[in-house]
Image (spheres, grey):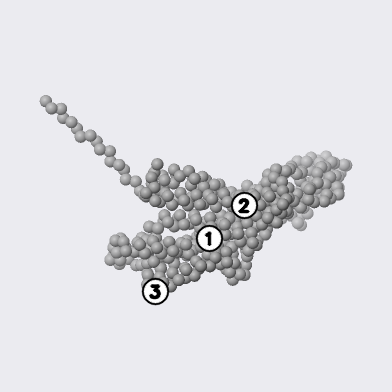
């Protein structure tokens, strides 16, 4: 009797969408993931903004001239003097602080030491390597806290709430401002200008490139000529011209000007992709069904360009950060006292030859390099991830 043999079950491979393989290739690219991690960290710092700064004054601009040009890691004793009611600003609240910082509620004075004498506070001056020491000061206890009271209670209040030991982990600049706070707040400016520039360049580039590639003919020739003219102008010169035309050198002007110089890259890529896709079968089918041109372009052609556009957007993000830093270094971008990294490099450059100049140049320059490198690594990783020939292992 012959034994019946059942057919072996065949394991059918489950079909996976293309996005699955893109994610797998990207996740296995270690340099790209390291770059993405640093970008996410900078984004969190930019979003938290003033909430995480040691100095949460507007633009982190609370400068103490006695503490100018100090090296990283030094500590100072700060005496906080109460402001008169007429000069005291109202608290902005949590959301107000996130958007624009908190106006200081005290006048701060660095001191070298202090002692109490009857109803007065005697302070010794803070000794700085670059500033002449002032004479010691005598403050009445009521003047320090801003209200009268019993001397013993006032002394306890001063020691608990008006004397602070502050550590400047990355030192101070030439105006006595906390370098760490300005570096952290500078991520908001750099990422903000990169985001706005990329959005403007992608929207404008997709619009012009899609029309040029799909319509063709004299429209394509005209728009291609416009791209060539803009392409031939150095980006920094174009930003300067736009800033002069808008008669402004503020933060938002820099955002818009940088974005208007970067759309040509996107337009050229979209035009090339459109020329190759417009003859595909699914496009011909759409024409036969009577779909309008704008729907064919926005619903069927542009979604097929997602990969190249994402890769180009990361590259433009890094280029926008470098361009803004260069403009701010030259004094043509973000204006003081806003904490732009390029402006901070310029301030350190003016002090080169001193210990403070070394740190003030190195720290913002290092952060700019790391952020630009991270975007480039992520862009290379996305390029490989969207390439079907890249192996998964």
Kindly identify which residue carries mark 1: 197
In the image, taking residue 330 as reference, residue 151 lies left or right, namely right
- Residue 316 visible in image: yes
Mark 1 touching mark 2, by CB under 8 A? no
Kindly identify which residue carries mark 3: 218
Mark 3 touching mark 2, by CB under 8 A? no
- Distance between the alpha carbons at the discs numbered 3 and 1: 29 Å
Residue at x 63% of width, y 47% of height: 52
Ranked by sequence position, the earlier of labels 3 and 1 is 1
Q: Residue furthest bottom?
A: 218
Q: Residue furthest front?
A: 353
Kindly identify which residue carries mark 2: 365
Q: Nearer the viewer, residue 169 or 228?
A: 228
The image shows residue 79, relative to residue 252, as above or below, that is above
Which of pointers 1 and 2 indicates the residue nearer the eye?
2
Dividing the picture into quadrants, the one containing residue 302 is bottom left
**Label 1 SS:** helix
In the image, taking residue 257 as reference, residue 276 lies left or right, namely left
Ranked by sequence position, the earlier of labels 3 and 2 is 3
**Label 3 SS:** helix
Residue 118 x, y percent position in the rendering: 88, 42
Residue at x 38% of width, y 63% of height: 274
Label 3: how many Cα within 10 Å (few below 14, some 14–19, many 20+):
few
Ranked by sequence position, the earlier of labels 1 and 2 is 1
For the C terminus, the quadrant is: top left
Residue at x 48% of width, y 43% of height: 30
Residue 50 x, y percent position in the rendering: 63, 51
């Amino acid at each position: 009797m012959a034994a019946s043999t059942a057919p072996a079950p065949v394991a059918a491979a489950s079909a996976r969408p293309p996005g699955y393989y893109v994610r797998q290739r990207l996740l296995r690219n270690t340099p790209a993931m390291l770059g993405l991690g640093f970008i996410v960290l900078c984004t969190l710092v930019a979003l938290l903004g003033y909430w995480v700064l040691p100095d949460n004054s507007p633009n982190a601009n609370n400068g103490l001239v006695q503490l100018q040009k100090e090296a990283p890691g030094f500590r100072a004793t700060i005496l906080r003097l109460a402001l008169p009611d007429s000069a005291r600003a109202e608290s902005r609240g949590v959301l107000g602080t996130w958007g624009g910082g908190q106006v200081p509620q005290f006048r701060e004075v660095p001191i070298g030491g202090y002692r109490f004498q009857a109803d007065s506070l005697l302070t010794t001056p803070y000794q700085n390597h670059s500033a002449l020491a002032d004479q010691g000061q005598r403050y009445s206890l009521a003047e320090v806290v801003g209200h009268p009271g019993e001397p013993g209670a006032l002394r306890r209040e001063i020691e608990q709430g008006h004397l602070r030991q502050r550590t400047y982990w990355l030192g101070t600049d030439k105006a006595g401002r906390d370098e760490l706070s300005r570096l952290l707040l500078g991520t908001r400016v750099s990422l903000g200008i990169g985001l706005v520039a990329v959005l403007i360049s992608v929207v404008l580039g997709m619009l012009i490139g899609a029309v040029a590639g799909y319509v063709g003919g004299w429209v394509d020739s005209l728009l291609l000529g416009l791209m060539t003219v803009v392409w031939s102008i150095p980006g920094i010169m174009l930003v300067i011209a736009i800033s002069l035309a808008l008669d402004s050198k503020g933060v938002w002007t820099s955002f818009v000007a940088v974005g208007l110089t970067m759309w040509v890259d996107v337009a050229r890529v979209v035009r090339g992709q459109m020329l190759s896709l417009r003859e595909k079968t699914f496009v011909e089918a759409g024409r036969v069904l009577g779909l309008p041109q704008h729907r064919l372009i926005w619903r069927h052609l542009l979604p097929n360009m997602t990969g190249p556009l994402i890769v180009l957007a990361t590259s433009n993000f890094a280029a926008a950060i470098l361009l803004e830093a260069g403009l701010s270094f030259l004094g043509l971008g973000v204006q003081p006292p806003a904490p732009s990294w390029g402006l901070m490099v310029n301030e350190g450059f003016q002090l080169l030859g001193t210990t403070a100049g070394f740190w003030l140049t190195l720290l913002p320059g290092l952060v700019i390099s790391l952020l630009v490198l991270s975007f480039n690594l992520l862009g290379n990783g996305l390029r490989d991830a969207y390439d079907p020939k890249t192996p998964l292992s």
